[in-house]
Image (cartoon, rainbow, N blue to C red):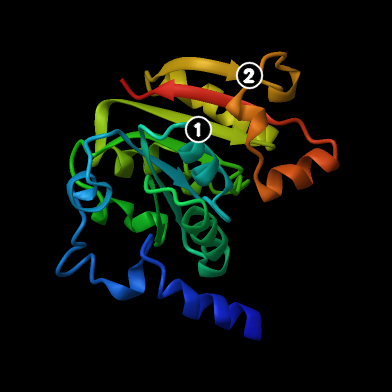
């Protein structure tokens, strides 16, 4: 392991906006903020929005900048990636940002019933041969429903045609409600958070000529 990565891991331990699974027994004694994020961390009743597989936190931080009346939590299992997002949020003095370093399989241990209003999934692994491991699959949505509000909204932004076609098929099958379907977000003529905020991976895909698609839906 590089010295740079070790230094980031050490600094992660000092960040007040980062919570790591290694520091809690969420499955046993529980996570102290479960069901209490608004009251005990953000100190408000604003909507809580998650970004799953947030990487370096570009979308988490970008959304928090644009919507100060909402709270954002970026989730990833890679500490070296989260370091960048945590540092950016602290340097920009964003009180409406937090990060979780956890496996998403365990996500329902960290949030309480009806605690989360919205989920963003940005450029996830398409899992070509494992539908159940796709972060927007019914398998994972069943985990999210343990803590989502009844009218919760989900957003997928992806360079994968496989995932774009997959979610458009699954939405009617699950009787979810399609809200937006944009095959090419960069064809939009008006300013949009879909083009104004770019992740590290998105910039890479764009340079390679990939089409970036977006789908938004409600679970009820």
- Residue 121 position in % (x across, y down): 51, 40
Q: CB of mark 2 within 8 Å of CB of mark 1?
A: no
Nearer to the camera, 16 or 168: 16
Mark 2 neighbour density, 10 Å: few (under 14) some (14–19) many (20 or more): some
From this view, report whether residue 71 is shown above or below residue 91.
above
Where disc 1 sits, the SS reads: helix
Label located before the other in sequence (2 or 1): 1
Q: Does residue 136 appear in this view?
A: no
Where disc 2 sits, the SS reads: strand
Q: Determine which quarter of the picture holds residue 46.
A: top left
Which mark's residue is nearer the viewer, 2 or 1? 1
Q: Which residue is mark 2?
A: 182
State the mark number for residue 189.
none
Q: CA distance from mark 2 to mark 1?
A: 21 Å
Nearer to the camera, 32 or 52: 32
Q: Residue sitting at 70 percent across and 31 percent down?
A: 212
Nearer to the camera, 200 or 162: 200
- Residue 88 position in % (x across, y down): 54, 56
On-image quarter of the C terminus: top left
State the mark number for residue 66.
1
Q: Determine which quarter of the picture holds residue 49.
A: top left
Mark 1 neighbour density, 10 Å: few (under 14) some (14–19) many (20 or more): few
Nearer to the camera, 103 or 65: 65
In the figure, is residue 140 to the left or right of 150? right
Q: Residue sitting at 60 percent across and 49 percent down?
A: 125
On-image quarter of the N terminus: bottom right
Q: Residue sitting at 68 percent across and 37 percent down?
A: 160
Q: Does residue 32 appear in this view?
A: yes
- Residue 109 position in % (x across, y down): 24, 56
In the figure, is residue 74 to the left or right of 144? right
Residue extending furthest toward the right: 208
């Amino acid at each position: 392991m590089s010295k740079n990565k070790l230094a980031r891991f050490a600094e992660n331990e000092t960040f007040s906006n980062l919570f790591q699974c290694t520091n809690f027994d969420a499955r046993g004694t529980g996570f102290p903020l479960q069901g209490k994020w608004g009251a005990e961390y953000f100190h408000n009743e604003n909507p809580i929005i998650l970004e799953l597989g947030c990487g370096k936190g570009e979308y988490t931080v970008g959304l928090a900048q644009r919507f100060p009346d909402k709270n954002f939590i970026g989730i990833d299992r890679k500490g070296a990636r989260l370091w960048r997002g945590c540092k950016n949020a602290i340097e920009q003095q964003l009180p409406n940002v937090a990060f979780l370093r956890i496996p998403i399989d365990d996500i329902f241990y960290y949030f309480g019933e009806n605690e989360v209003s919205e989920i963003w999934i940005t450029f996830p692994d398409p899992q070509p041969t494992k539908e159940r491991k796709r972060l927007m699959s019914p398998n994972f949505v069943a985990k999210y429903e343990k803590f989502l509000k009844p009218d919760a909204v989900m957003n997928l932004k992806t360079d994968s045609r496989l995932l774009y076609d997959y979610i458009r098929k699954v939405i009617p099958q699950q009787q979810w409600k399609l809200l937006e379907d944009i095959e090419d977000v960069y064809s939009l003529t008006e300013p949009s958070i879909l083009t104004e905020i770019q992740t590290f991976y998105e910039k890479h895909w764009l340079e390679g000529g990939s089409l970036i698609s977006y789908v938004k839906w409600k679970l009820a």
